[in-house]
Image: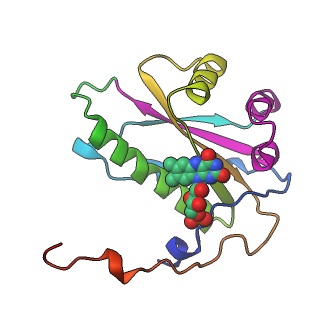
């Protein structure tokens, strides 16, 4: 799948908005990911209006791509499943979900950059400003837009044979 090779972190966007049908495709792709015990521990906070975008832009004043992105998707991890919560499995599932999301973005000719959320001020900011309840963890911020550079998504060969161990480490 060539999209895997082309996907890059894109950090420069035009001000062109992302059409609703593309947002729908991105979210559908994210939700097609595999997940431990099929728990599908994801939810999505879509920031696309001026008010919500300005809140997040104010929190990242020196991040050019967050200032420019016409769409921010905050990927949320739910912990209120009826099944037991296993953070190890849940976090792996979240990674698969986000990679699916990024690949669909790339497939649509758009660009995105994953911004990590960790315990502390980023999590607190998201909880407080977007009314995220205690049982939902802000997991990642994904800035999405039309790349200013048409070649922003491009192949960089990262194959490294020394990382592969056949049959025994
Ligand atoms: C968990 C995680 C957190 C990241 N956080 C940030 C971030 O805070 N800011 C940023 O500019 N890029 C962030 N990135 C993007 C990485 O810097 C990027 O994926 C890496 O440099 C490889 O480049 P590529 O995505 O173009 O292949 C993050 C990526 C991951 C997976």
Residue 77 horizontal/vertical position (percent):
43, 33
Residue 63 horizontal/vertical position (percent):
77, 44
Q: Is residue 103 above or below residue 1?
A: above
Q: Quadrant of residue 84?
A: top left
Residue at horizontal 71%, vertical 44%? 71
Give the total number of marks visible in the rendering: 0
Residue 143 horizontal/vertical position (percent):
67, 47
For residue 15, side relative to residue 39 (left or right): right
Residue 142 horizontal/vertical position (percent):
61, 46
Q: Is residue 65 above or below residue 50?
A: below
Q: Quadrant of residue 39?
A: top left
For residue 4, side relative to residue 35 (left or right): right
Residue at horizontal 55%, vertical 26%? 120
Magenta segment = 50-79
User: Can residue 16 be seen from the camera position used here?
Assistant: yes
Q: How is the image coloured?
A: rainbow
- Figure quadrant of the C terminus: bottom left
Front residue of this view, candidates 156 and 107: 156
Q: Is residue 61 above or below residue 4?
A: above
For residue 47: magenta?
no
Residue at horizontal 80%, vertical 27%? 51
Name of the residue lying farthest toward the right = 15
> Ligand 1 falls in which quarter?
bottom right
Q: Quadrant of residue 146?
A: bottom right
Front residue of this view, candidates 3 and 154: 154
């Amino acid at each position: 799948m060539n999209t895997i090779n082309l996907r890059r972190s894109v950090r420069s966007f035009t001000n062109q908005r992302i059409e609703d049908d593309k947002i729908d495709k991105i979210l559908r792709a994210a939700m097609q990911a595999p997940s431990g015990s099929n728990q599908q521990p994801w939810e999505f906070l879509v920031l696309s209006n001026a008010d919500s975008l300005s809140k997040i832009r104010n929190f990242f004043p020196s991040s050019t791509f967050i200032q420019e992105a016409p769409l921010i998707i905050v990927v949320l991890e739910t912990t209120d499943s009826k099944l037991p919560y296993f953070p190890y499995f849940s976090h792996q599932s979240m990674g698969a979900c986000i990679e699916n999301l990024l690949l669909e973005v790339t497939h649509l000719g758009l660009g995105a950059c994953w911004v990590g959320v960790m315990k502390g001020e980023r999590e607190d900011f998201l909880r407080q400003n977007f009314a995220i309840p205690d049982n939902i963890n802000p997991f990642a911020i994904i800035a999405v837009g039309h790349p200013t550079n048409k070649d922003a998504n491009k192949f960089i060969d990262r194959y490294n044979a020394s990382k592969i161990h056949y049959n025994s480490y």
